[in-house]
Amino acid sequence: ALHGAETIAAVIVEPVAGSAGVLPPPRGYLERLRAICDRHGILLIFDEVITGFGRLGEPFAAQALGVIPDIMTTAKGITNGALPMGAVFAHRKVHDAIVQGPPAAIEFFHGYTYSGHPVACAAALASLEIYRRDGLFTRVKTLAGLWEDSLHALRGKPNVIDIRNIGLMGAIELAPRPDAPGARGYEVLVKALKAGLLVRATGDIIALSPPLIISEAQIGQLFDILGGVLDDVA
Ligand SMILES: Cc1ncc(COP(=O)(O)O)c(C=O)c1O
């Protein structure tokens, strides 16, 4: 409304904000965003770098959350993180607008030194085959209940002010120390690492996003370690 929809080419969002602290979208939020973009001819882009490839119990967050973007960016899971690779998926209408230009025009003029690198592509193809063979795109559905219960069982631990989860993502938000925001989260990260558990701390939010092959016993182990660390960090 302030600047005019005609000045906005696209809106890009993570369907579940990851690095910002694991923020599942409020109910109806993505649907509303989709509707606003449609009304004004603005492209909707989902950054599915974290949520893509099975993290939410469906191949992509777009399917898990029922909102289809015009473009999706992906990386991480496409090669299981084993080799660097990213991919952009576009709706047919976006593809055609780019590719069906005047015959003399170079279509979608762009390029990268390592575009379509054969080794990365081999890793991606192998990962996709394993995802299919082991049913990993939907495995999270069978783990989500245990994941949620185990995560929320930490609610009484010292300094915990919020706990959030969606699919196989989770966050434990800790109250920041008045004089040192981020210090408590970092101390949890260091102590967890020493105890054999790798977590991510974004400020005072402990973010969890384990491998899709995690076993039920390992989920128990993960939260045992984390619970002990939270008890131990003042
Ligand atoms: C949601 C999200 N988008 C984008 C990126 C950056 O991706 P890339 O390094 O493939 O450009 C990250 C990296 O952690 C991420 O978490």
Image (cartoon, helix red, strand yellow):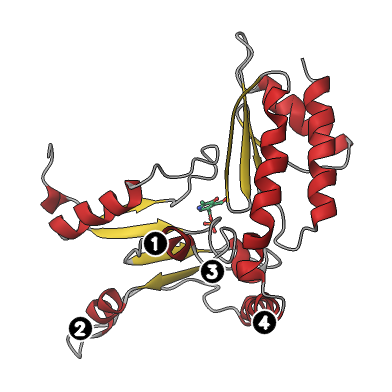
Label 1 element class: loop
> Percent position (x, y) of residue 28?
33, 48
Q: CA distance from mark 1 to mark 4?
A: 25 Å
Considering only order in the chain, which callout, 2 or 1, is on the residue closer to the N terminus?
A: 1
Q: Amino acid type of disc 4?
A: Glu
What is the number of the mark on residue 66?
1
Quadrant in which the C terminus appears? top right
Q: CA distance from mark 2 to mark 4?
A: 35 Å
* In contact (CB < 8 Å): disc 3 and disc 4: no
- The residue mark sitting in front, 1 or 2, is 1
Q: Amino acid type of disc 1?
A: Gly
> Percent position (x, y) of residue 214?
77, 58
- The residue mark sitting in front, 1 or 4, is 1
Residue 193 is left or right of residue 146, and the answer is right
Q: Residue furthest bottom?
A: 103
Q: Amino acid type of disc 3?
A: Pro
User: Is 98 placed above or below 187 here?
Assistant: below
Q: Which residue is mark 2?
A: 101
Q: CA distance from mark 1 to mark 2?
A: 31 Å
Q: Residue at x 70, y 23 (%)?
A: 156
Q: Please rate how many residues cluster around mark 3, counting C-alpha atoms within 10 Å: few if below 14, some from 14 to 19, many from 20.
A: some
What is the number of the mark on residue 129?
4
Quadrant in which the N terminus appears? top left
Q: Kindly tell me whether residue 80 is visible in this rendering.
A: yes
Q: Residue at x 30, y 58 (%)?
A: 44
Residue 219 is left or right of residue 147, and the answer is right
